[in-house]
Amino acid sequence: MPIYTMVLAWLFVAACAAEAIYQPVFDKANSELVGVAGYLVAAVLVAAGIVAFRRTSPRLAVALVTVGALLGAVMLIWTLLVPIMALTLIVLVALGARRGSSAAAAPAG
């Protein structure tokens, strides 16, 4: 997976985790348990997808990143940057998986 995809993925994870921490600590008036859980689940799914990309199936990685990124985008829909990051991340991971699976299917030589 290209380094820029990894950086974007970890930035997305950090943004979701930061929002999950920020809401109950600093924004008690608007903090909701569902929102905090949604941010944490999105961060965990994207992180698991990035780890799974190297260790297991690239298709599993694409599925985890897609679900996590979409959940994070829905939770942070009021911003513009995070949904764009989520869609870009989905495309980049899918392209990386396609390149990785085609390289693995090609004969060595």
Image (cartoon, rainbow, N blue to C red):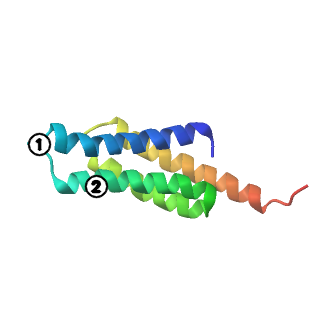
Mark 1, secondary structure of its residue? loop
Question: Would residue 96 be visible to someone looking at this image?
Answer: yes
Can you give x and y, in whole percent of width and height, for residue 95 in the image? 60, 50
Circles 2 and 1: CB distance less than 8 Å? no
Residue at 63% across, 41% down: 2
Residue 60 occupies which quadrant of the picture? Answer: bottom right
Task: Give the residue pinned by disc 1.
Answer: 28
Residue at 47% across, 42% down: 10
Q: CA distance from mark 2 to mark 1?
A: 17 Å
- Residue type pointed to by label 1: Lys
Task: Give the residue pinned by disc 2.
Answer: 38
Question: Would residue 77 be visible to someone looking at this image?
Answer: no
Q: Is residue 82 left or right of residue 23?
A: right
Q: Residue furthest right?
A: 109
Q: Is the residue 29 above or below the residue 50 in the image?
A: above
Can you give x and y, in whole percent of width and height, for residue 4 in the image? 57, 36
Mark 2, secondary structure of its residue? helix
